[in-house]
Image (cartoon, coloured by chain):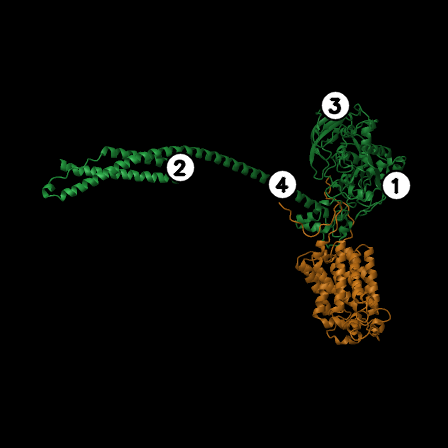
Chain colours: A orange, B green
Amino acid sequence: MAFVQQSSPHARRARPTSRLMLWVIVATLPGLLAQTLFFGWGNLINVVWCVTVALASEAAILKLRQKPVAFFLKDNTAALTGLLLGLSLPQFAPWWVSAIAVVSAIVVAKQLYGGLGSNPFNPAMVGYALVLISFPVAMTTNWAEPALLWDGAPGFGDTLAAIASVQQTTVDGWTMATPLDEYKHKIVSLTAEEVVQHPTFGDGVARGWEWVNGAFLAGGLVLIGLRIITWHIPAGVLGGLVIMSLAFGSNADLYAPLTLHLLAGGTMLGAFFIATDPVSAATSHQGKLIYGAGIGVLIYVIRTWGGYPDAVAFSVLLLNFAVPFIDHYTPPRTYGHHKARRGVPGRTQG
Amino acid sequence: MTQLWDFAGGIHPPENKHQSTARPIRTAEVPERLVLPLQQHIGEPAAAVVEAGDRVLKGQVIADVADGLGVPVHAPTSGVIDSISELPVPHPSGMTDRCIVLRPDGEDEWIQLHPATDYRERERTEVLELIRNAGISGMGGAGFPSNIKLRPPKERKVDTLILNGAECEPYITADDMTMRERADDIVAGLKIMAWILRPGRCIIGIEDNKPEAVEALRTAIEGTQIELAVIPTKYPSGGEKQLIQILTGMEVPSGGIPADIGVMCQNVGTAVAVGHAVLEGKPLISRVVTITGEAVREPGNFDALLGTPIDHLLAQAGLMPEQVNRLVLGGPMMGYTLTTTAVPVIKTSNCVIAATATELPAPPPEQPCIRCGQCAEACPMELLPQQLFWHAKATEFEKAEHLNLFDCIECGACSYVCPSSIPLVQYYRYAKGEIRVQRAEQLKADRARERFEARQQRLEREQQEKEQRRKERAQAAAEAQAKKKAEAERAAAEGSAVDERAAKAALVEQALARKKAKADAGKPAASAEVPAPTPEKPDLEALEKQLTQAQSKLETMQGMLEDAKAQQADNVDKLERAVAKNHDRVQRAETALTEARQQLAAESPTTD
């Protein structure tokens, strides 16, 4: 009898990468649904378009790199990158802006660094930051009005036409500044009460945005419940943002209030779905907290004193830079040791 | 109620234990041949004390370890020694080793037994010797000689004695069934070990998935101080370090042993063996082995004689040979695959899984690590498995060691959960192996360097001693020569003084003669024709003698100079000056002689 020779463990019951990624994709659906309900078809079309471009560019570059195309496409990571970009780009972002974001994310930020697992930066955020800097007008003027405000909200066809059109003028009537943008620019000359008169703020925090953020929060909690991500990074991000907001922004007449920071813009999507990308995030629990908190603090700093109304992409990318450093100094204490061994191995004498 | 702590990480693999607990422990049939490896424990292999053809009785020592760490091997039944030869033994490498092959005669005739029911009246060392002579080594896994383990260093008092009945590996039920059916034996053995160690606490730790075992032991410990701790089912709670943490909240220091923190763990099977050894005088000749897996029809536990070939047990469990895909010795998490069913049961064999291809399928292809951190979540030692993996893969062993690679217990939890199906544990084993090799080579290189340096030092020392001796000799010689030279110089000085005086006298005479001649020339011509009165004839003989003397002295001095130069003595300068001086002297003597000769020659025609 010839028996299979194998090294232990002989049993394994892992959720394969593809399943983990699928769960993340599923967990974004409430957020996508909320976006569609409150901002129209834009994000949904973006998502379909971005995922398509992502899969196509991943397949092409894998082929070029002479890697097994089907094997890697099936891991769902490219689809997830496309999905995240589709969720975070403005609803009426032109098709070519989205495409540039996706291609630079997949080809440059991911595959040219060695493919899955080797990218030091979050691919989706590389793509996002690239188009944000390169096409500032397209990226800031294409945010949809919350659906409740629309007179004759654009239907699927109109939205698709607007995205597919090269001309940008057609969407003027349907778009407006994001609440963070609005608050930031108006608070300089107005009081908080006056600022929130703007229709984008609605009766709650920010019409539509609060629901979208709430939905992403729910999806994120599902991921924590499924042990696909740990609580450390989201807690760090939100914690950093909250602490900064309480420390510096308690006066609503000067700075955006905490509720707006948490429930407008890309906060929850960033905290639960983007900062938690394992490949480019810190690894130990302590490291994850530091990494998350760094992102949270930076989001606040850039939003408040920087030139951009939202800052998730830059914050995540900046902390991606710091990951090797953080990892270096935050290994856990191993069982049976007095303290953690930080830093690099010391040269022993002799 | 014993307070419990949790340990980090851990996983919950499917237990697959019910298959083999359906039946009580069966006594395995005695096979035609028993194969007893000489090494069944950690330490030195035993040496056979019987020869082929000898008849042995059940319980008779057939191999022993004369010196070094080890325990004897006993005949599991009476019979005749068939041979002592190289046969396959249970080992991950599938290697062969020396084994005694015993052909049972069916009599099952015991040697004279010497129970020590009165062990409490005896010396502890005597009881430990009984345990050693019974051939008991740990039956949980590693197989460390029990008598050594039960005798921790004097300064390490064992406060807590833990009996490990956790049995956290899936499939294995040998300890479970032992606890269910032999609870009294376990408690008896535990009492003996407790009597030896005198700990403050005795705790039996069992996972809560073994309610029958818990009940049986609860009954058995009634009226004793022994605590029963039912711990949550989680792999690897049966790992020694994890169980200690669960039951005491303490951690075994890295690189240390449990005794360092006053704890000792013993396996329940070991307790049974200790009880039998002391109370009945019976050596360790059999053990409970789980035979399970979907490729056997009647999985269960067998009380098998040591040396029973595994195929014999598999056959009794109803093996379906065409179904077996993988044969694992031990559990699915830490066991190793066998290449053949011909290997025997040894003291550490606890389980054989005859798995079908669907039961333990081949792992899917490896994918890139996405740093998801599931491995770190599962690691019971709080390591960073993915960093260790990166470093092992990049052969950055120093960094891997820095991240405590050697604290990895190879439990396999990280591989179990890895979504990219990376065989993490294999990478750690590889890295550990490479580091061990490097260390061994380093050690070898260090030794070689030390040897070389020692040799160099010895040669240098010898050279110095030689030099020292040579210098001493040279100095003695130089002194002797200096003495001689001083004498010679004194003599030469005297000699030269005489010569010089004579030469001066001759010169004075010559000068006088010349003056006289001049004076004569100044006289009337008549007188000019008259030859000048001949001055006193120079003493040729004396001059010649002077020259020879000076020459011989010069030669002596030159000889001495040569010697001194050859020996590099420090009187070379002095001798050179002396030679030069003598050289002048010789020249002077020569000049004097020549002049004298010329004078004589000049005179002779006139005289003729």
Separation of residues labelled 2 and 4 (CA atoms): 51 Å
The residue at which mark 2 appears reads as B564
Q: Amino acid at mark 1?
A: Pro
Disc nearer the start of the sequence (1/4): 1
Query: Callout 3: helix, strand or loop?
Result: strand
Disc nearer the start of the sequence (1/3): 3
The residue at which mark 3 appears reads as B55
Q: In the rendered view, would you say A203 is above or below A321?
A: below
Separation of residues labelled 1 and 4 (CA atoms): 51 Å
Is the residue under label 3 in contact with that under label 2 (CB below 8 Å)?
Answer: no
The residue at which mark 1 appears reads as B211
Same chain assignment for discs 1 and 3: yes
Give the crowd class for mark 4: few <14, some 14-19, many >=20 residues within 10 Å: few
Of residues B311 and B543, the one drawn nearer to the viewer in this rendering? B543
Name the spot of residue A308 as percent of width and height, x first: 74, 69
Give the crowd class for mark 2: few <14, some 14-19, many >=20 residues within 10 Å: many
Same chain assignment for discs 3 and 4: yes
Separation of residues labelled 1 and 3 (CA atoms): 45 Å
**Marks 2, 1: nearer the viewer:** 2
Q: In the rendered view, would you say A121 is above or below A93?
A: above
The residue at which mark 4 appears reads as B443
